[in-house]
Image (spheres, rainbow, N blue to C red):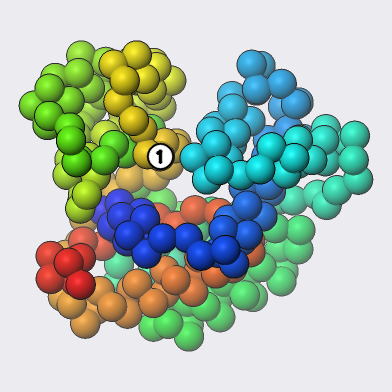
């Protein structure tokens, strides 16, 4: 299972403190603003906004915050203009990293991300250095507790999913992006509780790491996640079971 999946599981276990939740709301607000600016404020005709609103619901983001973000994106309220940037690099042990960000200052953001990598045993690479190691997929997570795994496997395959794997306390389901919405609706109709869903990057091949390297990688993930500009972090590391349990 790829590093992105392990990171999602670890963050869920750690829980969200109030300060962390505030940071998460700020990041989702940027996502909503950018989506509304690019495609308008109606999620029925703006798929990118629909996905951003799904993330807001999953994070229990207050309705007022969501509405303000949409209005900032459409220009009804004054707001900052953000740019989409993707950084590529390597972490401890040579694992690949893709970092998606929204920033109002590309020079500041690039300097900050570079410093985070270098401080935590990694290095920022040139554009395209690791992108070929990942594919864009629809990713859904369903809690494993109380779910019949065989039944779920049958339902997700019938709905057009490509794969289902176990990652900690979750079943992770991946599908091609064009089939993402149909898969979500099919699982909703079967009354499965979807813990999270996103269009994201999945590593083509994972790289197992030892416990010491895994701890250094997680420290880098934490530091990147603390950046206000960073939206998504993808990597191809595979943690040892001992570290996941810890």
Res. 117 in view: yes
Tell me: 41 left or right of 61.
Answer: right
Q: Residue furthest left?
A: 150
Q: Which residue is drawn at the image coordinates 36% and 33% (left, top)?
A: 194
Q: Which residue is drawn at the image coordinates 33% and 45% (left, top)?
A: 202
The location of residue 207, given as percent across then percent down, is 20, 62
State which quadrant residue 78 falls in: top right
Image quarter hosting the C terminus:
bottom left
The location of residue 157, given as percent across then percent down, is 19, 20
Tell me: 233 left or right of 74.
Answer: left
The location of residue 170, given as percent across then percent down, is 24, 44
Whether residue 122 is situated above or below residue 58 in the rendered picture = below
**Number of numbered labels in the structure image:** 1
Pick the front one: 185 or 227? 185
Whether residue 161 is situated above or below residue 1 in the rendered picture = above
Q: Which residue is drawn at the image coordinates 75% and 35% (left, top)?
A: 67
Mark 1 nearby-residue class (10 Å; few <14, some 14–19, many ≥20): some
């Amino acid at each position: 299972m790829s590093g992105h999946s392990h990171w999602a599981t670890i963050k869920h276990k750690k829980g969200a403190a109030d300060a962390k939740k505030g940071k998460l709301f700020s990041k989702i607000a940027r996502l909503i603003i950018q989506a509304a600016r690019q495609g308008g404020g109606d999620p029925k005709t703006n798929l990118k906004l629909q996905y951003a609103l799904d993330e807001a619901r999953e994070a229990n983001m207050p309705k007022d915050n969501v509405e303000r973000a949409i209005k900032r994106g459409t220009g009804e309220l004054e707001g900052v203009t953000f740019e989409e940037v993707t950084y590529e690099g390597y972490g401890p042990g040579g694992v690949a990293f893709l970092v998606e960000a929204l920033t109002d200052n590309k020079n500041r953001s690039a300097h900050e991300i570079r410093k985070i990598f270098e401080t935590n045993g990694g290095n920022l690479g040139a554009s395209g250095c690791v992108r070929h190691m990942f594919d864009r997929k629809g990713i859904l997570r369903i809690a494993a507790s109380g779910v019949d795994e065989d039944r779920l496997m049958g339902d997700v395959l019938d709905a057009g999913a490509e794969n289902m794997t176990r990652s900690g306390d979750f079943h992770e389901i991946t599908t091609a992006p064009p089939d993402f919405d149909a898969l979500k609706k099919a699982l909703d109709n079967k009354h499965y509780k979807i813990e999270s869903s996103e269009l994201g990057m999945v590593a083509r091949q994972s790289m197992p790491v030892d416990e010491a390297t895994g701890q250094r990688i997680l420290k880098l993930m934490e530091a990147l996640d603390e950046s206000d500009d960073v939206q998504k972090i993808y990597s191809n590391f595979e943690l040892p079971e001992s570290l996941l349990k810890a």
